[in-house]
């Protein structure tokens, strides 16, 4: 069995964690490109979590097109009547559920958590994100009031002066 050795795109990209089995941690999309171009001899396989879900939003110049993969659903959305729209809605909700499930499994497997630890970690993360959003909103409101107060003082001084 041949070792999986992705071709690195530039000299500045370092090999991170190359083990005896040919595993390359951190290869990211470059590993996927290599996997797509590799011979079908069973020596190269791809283990990836989360990147197919997130990379289209992070890296707009991917060598593959996620939109092409969802073409049947996009075509379906233009062909259905209002009474048949539940098919499109169900398909879209199924994709969102599958994406969430894959992200959940990714967190579980990467950190070697049990299911309960993963649930606790995800809920803690969501709670922390909500607290950051709340703190940001409170700061926005406070600075907006401070700005309006200073503007009112400047207008008052301009009217009296």
Image: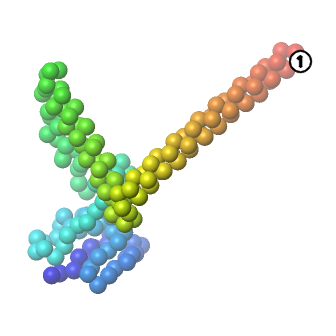
Q: Position of residue 133 (x, y in %)?
A: 54, 40
| Quarter of the rendering containing residue 76 | top left
Q: Is residue 45 above or below residue 132?
A: below
Q: Is residue 60 above or below residue 106?
A: above
Q: Residue furthest front?
A: 116
Name the image quarter holding residue 70.
top left
Residue drawn where x is 22% and y is 80% of the image: 3
Q: Nearer the viewer, residue 69 or 141?
A: 141
Instruction: Give the residue at x 59% y 35%.
Output: 137
Q: In x, y percent, where is residue 156?
A: 82, 18
Horizontally, residue 131 falls left or right of residue 69, namely right
Q: Residue at x 56, y 44 (%)?
A: 132
What residue would you read off at disc 1?
Answer: 161
Residue at disc 1, secondary structure: loop
Left or right of 55: which side holds 33? left
Residue shown at the point (87%, 15%) measured from the top left: 160
Residue 99 position in % (x across, y down): 29, 48
- Do we see residue 60 in this rendering? no
Q: Which quarter of the rendered picture does the C terminus lie within?
A: top right
Q: Compared to 143, does 160 lie above or below? A: above
Extreme-top residue of the structure: 159
Q: Which quadrant of the rendered structure holds the N terminus?
A: bottom left
Residue at the far right: name it. Answer: 161
In the figure, is residue 132 to the left or right of 16?
right
Q: Give the image location of residue 36, x and y in percent.
A: 19, 64
Number of callouts in the render?
1
């Amino acid at each position: 069995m041949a070792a999986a050795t992705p071709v690195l795109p530039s000299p500045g990209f370092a090999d991170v964690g190359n083990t005896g089995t040919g595993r390359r941690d951190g290869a990211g999309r470059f590993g996927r490109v290599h996997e797509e171009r590799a011979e079908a001899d069973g020596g190269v396989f791809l283990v990836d979590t989360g990147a197919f879900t997130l990379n289209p939003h992070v890296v707009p110049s991917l060598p593959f097109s996620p939109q092409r993969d969802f073409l049947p659903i996009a075509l379906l959305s233009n062909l259905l009547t209002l009474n048949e729209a539940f098919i499109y809605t169900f398909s879209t909700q199924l994709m969102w559920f599958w994406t969430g499930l894959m992200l959940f499994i990714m967190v579980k497997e990467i950190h070697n958590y049990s299911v309960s630890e993963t649930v606790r970690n995800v809920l803690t993360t969501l709670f922390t994100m909500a607290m950051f959003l709340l703190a940001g909103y409170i700061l926005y409101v406070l600075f907006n009031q401070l700005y309006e107060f200073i503007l009112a003082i400047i207008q008052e001084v301009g009217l009296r002066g």
